[in-house]
Amino acid sequence: MRKHIFNSIMVTLFASAGVLAQEKEKDSVLGTQTVNVVKAYTPSVSDAFKIKGTPSLDDSVTTSKKKIDYKIFSVPVASTFTPAKGKASAVEKAPKEKLYNTYASLGLGNYTSVLADFFTSRALSRTETVDVGLRHHSSQGGIDGVDLDNAFFNTKLDASYFKRDRDYTWGADLGFQHQIYNWYGVEEGLFEDAVLANIDEKQTYYNGELGAHINFNEGYFRGGNVLFRRFWDGMSSGENRLVAKPSFKFPVQDQLVTTHIFVDYLSGKFDRSYYSEEELKYSNVQLGINPNIVFIKDDVTFNLGATVAYMMDIENSESKFYVFPNISASYTLLEGFVTAYAGAKGDLQQNSYYGFANDNQFVSPTLTIAPSFQQYDIYGGIKGKFLPNLSYDLKAGYSSTDDYAFFVHNPNSSNFGLDDGYVYGNSFNVVYDKLNTLKVDGEVNLTISDKFSLGANGMFASYSTDELSEAYNLPSVRASIFSDFKIGEKWFGGASVFFMGERKDVLSADFITIDPADTAQEVTLDGYFDVNFNLGYNFTDRLSGFARLNNIANNDYQRWANYKVQGFQAVLGATYKFDF
């Protein structure tokens, strides 16, 4: 039926098309015609030819539908099954670590050693914090083969206040330190027991500090810090130091110029020199400015700067200007993996009694204090990562420093009738000379996870001097390996191995000249290894225990000439955390 309907429609369409074509051909003949419009055609839905939704069937054979009956046979089944109620699966979360604002630690070991540490941090408000810390380390000595008292005592108390504001932050710091050391490094077999028994080898150091700092988020003045330090000893020596360092930032042609200004005042005195009772005084002031501008383009970063300093020796009425370079550049060869860098810098270094006594606690209170001038330090290297968790930094450089301070042994001056505890060839002085250094150093760090890390660094240096025959007490080789680890949630620890290469020194001189080796015996201090290990265990989130093992190999080495160190050292202790 559908086929007949389709054929009828197609025939009608072709016939209509033929009539229209003939009329069009007639209309194409030019002529005059008159068209009368009676009414515009307005079509309606009734005019459309619509196919019925259910056409009548006119087939000769009509198949009737067969009636189907469906039946369900239900069979009852006994069941005791009861479905359980659904429950959402919980996501495992790591337990939140409880934080405490205070901890106290105490450890005891051989050589009658005591380690103590206390720290507390109190929030006065949402923007104010006060921190207080106390550290102590002491030992009653007992080094084998040492005739004099070799005990030491070191206690330091620190307190700080910090406040945050919307536009700036500021704080203040207060510190006090008390140290006791002994000049026990007399040459073995040089003195009789009666002489040794009368030596008062004790030296006491005191240090008090007061500082403040402020930092602004915006503006030309970005902040600065100021520090006043008073350092003195038990031999009537003392010095004062005042350092102020404001910083500024201002734009210059779409670039920010960072400028640091420094004022460094130092003055002090010693009751006497090593060979006479003449008082030693020193006083100087350093003024300087250090502008820097940084250019960054693609993979290149370039820092251009310089340090201009004015040094005035108040005690000797002398002054001098200095200009030092401060230039550095870096280029990223492979993002995150290889970066090359180079630079050149210089510095005016303020030497002080406090600095010398911290580097070498066995200096005599008879030092000549003068600044050092690092004319330049030219360096270059590469840094980056071998692997995402394996970083490296390799560098080589050459530097030149005028008036570098070298530690050298004081001569034995007990035959001059002096009775001070440092005149038996058991203390150190400083001498100054030009030092040129060619140095290569590197560092590698491996981080397996937050539970294990491993690192190593090393340095090789070659020295040359103008007047001195050797760069005294400076090692040519220095290296270390260190690691930290965690085992589960309870165990933690670390290990380190240090190596110090050979050093040169002089002994038993009667007079100090520009080169102590002219009238003294030059000695070589052997290199040494120092192996250390520490292990801890968390009993609870508050209480943990620890063990520290130092100089595990029990090496009988000398850090300074005639100054042996303690052998194998073991300390056991505990740390307790709480809210205060």
Image: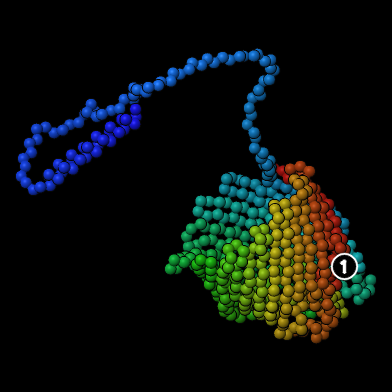
Indicate left or right for 91 with 237 as reference: left
Indicate left or right for 217 with 34 as reference: right
Q: Residue furthest right?
A: 193
Task: Quadrant for residue 527, please give it.
Answer: bottom right
Query: Could you tell me which residue is drawn at 66 percent across and 61 percent down?
Result: 387
Query: Could you tell me which residue is drawn at 52 percent across and 61 percent down?
Result: 222
Task: Report the residue marked by disc 1.
Answer: 556
The colour scheme used here is rainbow
Q: Where residue 536 sits in the image (x, y, percent)?
A: 79, 50
Q: Where residue 237 sits in the image (x, y, percent)?
A: 73, 69
Query: Could you tell me which residue is drawn at 67 percent across and 38 percent down?
Result: 92
Please state which of residues 270 and 124 is positioned toward the viewer in this rendering: 124
Q: Secondary structure at mark 1?
A: loop
* Mark 1 closeness class: few <14, some 14–19, many ≥20 residues within 10 Å: some
Task: Quadrant for residue 62, please give it.
Answer: top left
Q: Where residue 432 sits in the image (x, y, percent)?
A: 71, 79
Task: Quadrant for residue 336, please give it.
Answer: bottom right
- Quarter of the image containing the N terminus? top left
Which amino acid lies under the numbered mark 1 shown in the image of this protein?
Answer: Asp
Please state which of residues 461 and 367 is positioned toward the viewer in this rendering: 461
In this orientation, does residue 407 appear?
no
- Quarter of the image containing the C terminus? top right
Q: Where residue 233 sits in the image (x, y, percent)?
A: 75, 66
Indicate left or right for 431 with 335 as reference: right
Please state which of residues 252 and 431 is positioned toward the viewer in this rendering: 252
Tell me if residue 88 comes above or below residue 361 in the rendering: above
In this orientation, does residue 17 appear?
yes
